[in-house]
Image (tube, grey):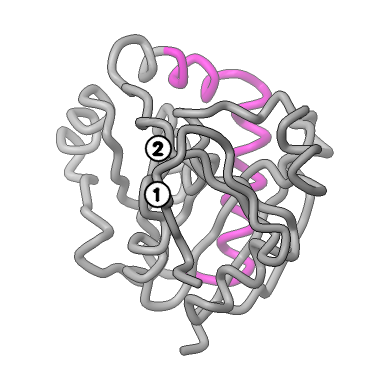
Amino acid sequence: MNPTPNFGEATLIWWPEYGMGHHPAAPMNYDGSYWSEYRERDASAMGAQLTAARVDLVRRHWAGEVVDVGIGGGRFVEEVEGQGFDVNPEAIAWLKAGDRYRNPYHGVDAVTCWDSLEHIVDPAALVASARHWVFVSMPIYANAQDCLQSRHYKPSEHLWYWEHDGLIRWFQRLGFECREHNTMESILGRDGIHSYAFRRTA
């Protein structure tokens, strides 16, 4: 199976044998108030805790430069002293103003995807661009029914959905092994969110 199949149906497609699903709705528009909303979230106490947990996860495994894909309000990029990539015009302008804009699809050592991998039309292409590490946080589901009943089921915003084992196997097919899995973001209050560190092995 192609790691990111798309059959074109306008409803949730779930492959129980692979522990993953896909909704082929057109991706949402990330213009408008998206940037200002996430700047506020990043400035909150929860934003500080989440950023600290994410920086700690990365630095337990990788001391080099990272490119954050889908930067939210930019706090992680600032605190990890990294670079970023986004589709929101204001986020792009902010990154470029600080000389922090980097297109990861041209090849990078490490990529972080905090609540973003599931939004990307072709996530396998992004993962393929990482030479060493991919760090991820996202909602994880028990099965298709759990997904459909979850508050994280958001067609057009979330295009891809994974079970825990399904995500690990998906990364394995792309040449990565899971070196850490934790639920720190759920512990901090983000229900159903899991975090991972994947290292390239092939």
Tag shown at residue 71: 2
Magenta region includes residue 55: yes
- From the viewer's perspective, is residue 86 above or below residue 176? above
- On the image, the x and y values in percent for residue 129 come to 32, 68
Question: Which amino acid, by three-letter code, is at mark 2?
Answer: Ile
Residue of label 1: 68
Tag shown at residue 95: none
Q: Residue at left 41%, top 63%?
A: 124
Question: Which amino acid, by three-letter code, is at mark 1?
Answer: Asp
Disc 1: CA contacts within 10 A as few (<14), some (14-19) or many (>=20): many
Question: What secondary structure is marked by label 2?
Answer: loop
Q: Is residue 200 left or right of residue 13?
A: left
User: Residue 11 sits in which quadrant?
Assistant: top right
Q: Residue at left 64%, top 72%?
A: 169
Magenta region includes residue 186: no
- On the image, the x and y values in percent for residue 98 come to 20, 38
Please state which of residues 171 and 89 is positioned toward the viewer in this rendering: 171
Please state which of residues 201 and 92 is positioned toward the viewer in this rendering: 201
- From the viewer's perspective, is residue 81 above or below residue 10? below
Distance Cα–Cα, label 2 vs label 1: 6 Å
- From the viewer's perspective, is residue 53 above or below residue 153? below
**Prevalent SS, magenta region:** helix
- On the image, the x and y values in percent for residue 13 come to 58, 45
- On the image, the x and y values in percent for residue 15 come to 65, 57
Q: In the image, which residues are magenta? A: 37-63
Do labels 2 and 1 touch, CB within 8 Å?
Answer: yes
Q: Is residue 150 left or right of residue 136?
A: right
Q: Residue at left 27%, top 27%?
A: 88
